[in-house]
């Protein structure tokens, strides 16, 4: 059974951010935040009250994966 959750550009999901290099640098690693899926492999982090946080980061740095066809999923 495939437990992946497919995502589309424009979707916003709440995730616990990974211990990626960018998240560590931004001091948000292991923090729960909303992630908005942007085009071209980018993601915008949002604070829990909905405000954009910093500049967009890559899907991978935000803990979002992609399949062979480039479609994002959790």
Image (cartoon, rainbow, N blue to C red):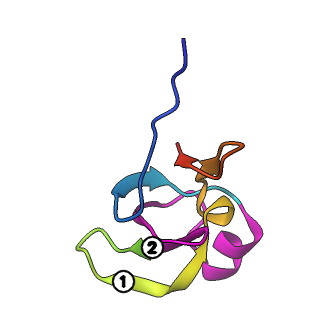
Find disc 1 in the rendering and name its residue. Answer: 52
Instruction: State if disc 1 and disc 2 touch (CB < 8 Å).
Output: yes
Taking the image as shown, residue 56 lies to the left or right of residue 35, namely: right
Find disc 2 in the rendering and name its residue. Answer: 45
The residue that appears at 61% across and 54% down in the rendered structure is 63
Check the picture and name the quadrant holding the N terminus: top right
The residue that appears at 25% across and 74% down in the rendered structure is 50
What is the span of residues highlighted in magenta in the rendered image?
20-44
The residue that appears at 51% across and 23% down in the rendered structure is 3
Residue 6 located within the stretch drawn in magenta: no
Residue 69 vs 55, above or below: the answer is above
| Residue 55 point in image, percent of width and height | 53, 88
| Residue 51 point in image, percent of width and height | 29, 82
The residue that appears at 64% across and 52% down in the rendered structure is 70
| Residue 53 point in image, percent of width and height | 43, 83
- Element type where label 2 sits in the image: strand
Taking the image as shown, residue 51 lies to the left or right of residue 46, namely: left
Residue closest to the far front: 69
């Amino acid at each position: 059974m495939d437990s992946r959750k497919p995502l589309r550009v424009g979707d916003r999901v709440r995730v616990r951010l990974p211990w990626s290099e960018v998240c560590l640098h931004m001091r948000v690693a292991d923090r729960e935040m909303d992630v908005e899926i942007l085009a071209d492999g980018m993601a915008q982090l949002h604070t829990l009250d909905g405000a954009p946080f910093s500049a967009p980061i890559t899907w991978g740095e935000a803990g979002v994966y992609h399949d062979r066809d480039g479609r994002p999923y959790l």
